[in-house]
């Protein structure tokens, strides 16, 4: 079993035993999990369609956790973000998708280009994830899946010490960021057209 598969299995066990999980409680359940593991969980959650405001809430959770990591503070989610209850069906889908992603990546991933997964690269990776996550706060449909896929690949690859996977995840995230940019531009143009008519 690869490192990421073992960690996903442990998280799945904790989630299955908990009741009424909020975003803050989910981070608490991860305990002393590494930053990549926390962001992996949140990014997979944000690939799953949810109720209104759900995507933005998870994006804010990713941003909050990333800023905390960059500042060297504990990974906690408080306030209304931390109190947001995560529906059980979404958590079930999250666990299944994480297990699937871990299996797929574990089958092709191996330690390589380790300078891209070491401690010296963590701040750069965090800053990149922060940049990619910012547009996802906006309530625009269908802009979360691709960037979060990229973020998830980055996190899984860091856990498996696969620098090539980190680069691949970065490319996927940048494609998602471009898609989000076009979607935001389209929404702005549509709003201007409607308001100007």
Image (cartoon, grey):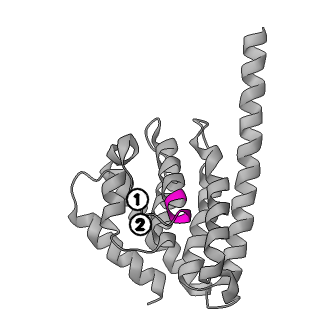
Q: Secondary structure at mark 1?
A: helix
The location of residue 157, given as percent across then percent down, is 59, 78
Q: Please, which residue is most extreme toward the top here? A: 197
The secondary element bearing badge 2 is classed as helix
The number of numbered discs placed on residues in the rendered structure image is 2
Please give the residue where the numbered disc 1 appears in the rendered image: 93
119 is higher (above) or lower (below) than 175: below
Disc on res. 111: none
Is residue 6 a member of the stretch shown in magenta? no
Q: Residue sitting at 31 percent across and 63 percent down?
A: 28
Point 42% across, 60% down: residue: 94
Quarter in which the C terminus is drawn? top right
Expressed as whole percent of the image width and height from the top left, the position of residue 170 reads 71, 67
Residue that badge 2 annotates? 96
Mark 2 crowd level (few <14, some 14–19, many ≥20, 10 Å Cα): some
* In contact (CB < 8 Å): disc 1 and disc 2: yes
- Residue 162 visible here: yes
Q: Quadrant of residue 129?
A: bottom right
Q: Nearer the viewer, residue 31 or 52?
A: 31
Q: Quadrant of residue 173?
A: bottom right
- Name the residue rendered at 34%, 71% in the picture: 11
Q: Considering depth in this image, is 178 or 28 the residue closer to the camera? A: 28
What span is colored magenta in the figure?
67-71
């Amino acid at each position: 079993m690869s490192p990421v598969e073992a960690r996903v299995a442990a998280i799945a066990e904790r989630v299955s035993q908990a009741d009424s999980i909020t975003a803050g409680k989910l981070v608490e359940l991860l305990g002393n999990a590494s930053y990549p593991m926390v962001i992996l969980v949140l990014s997979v959650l944000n690939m799953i369609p949810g109720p209104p405001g759900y995507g933005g809430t998870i994006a804010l959770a990713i941003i909050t956790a990333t800023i905390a990591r960059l500042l060297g503070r504990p990974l906690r989610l408080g306030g209304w973000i931390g109190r947001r209850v995560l529906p059980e069906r979404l958590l079930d889908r999250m666990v299944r998708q994480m297990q699937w992603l871990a299996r797929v990546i574990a089958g092709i991933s191996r330690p390589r280009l380790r300078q891209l997964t070491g401690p010296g690269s963590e701040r750069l990776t965090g800053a990149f994830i922060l940049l990619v996550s910012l547009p996802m706060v906006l309530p625009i449909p269908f802009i979360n899946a691709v960037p979060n896929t990229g973020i998830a690949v980055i996190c899984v690859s860091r856990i498996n010490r696969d620098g090539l996977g980190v680069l691949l995840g970065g490319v996927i995230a940048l494609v998602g960021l471009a898609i989000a940019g076009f979607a935001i531009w389209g929404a702005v143009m549509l709003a201007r057209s409607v308001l100007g008519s």
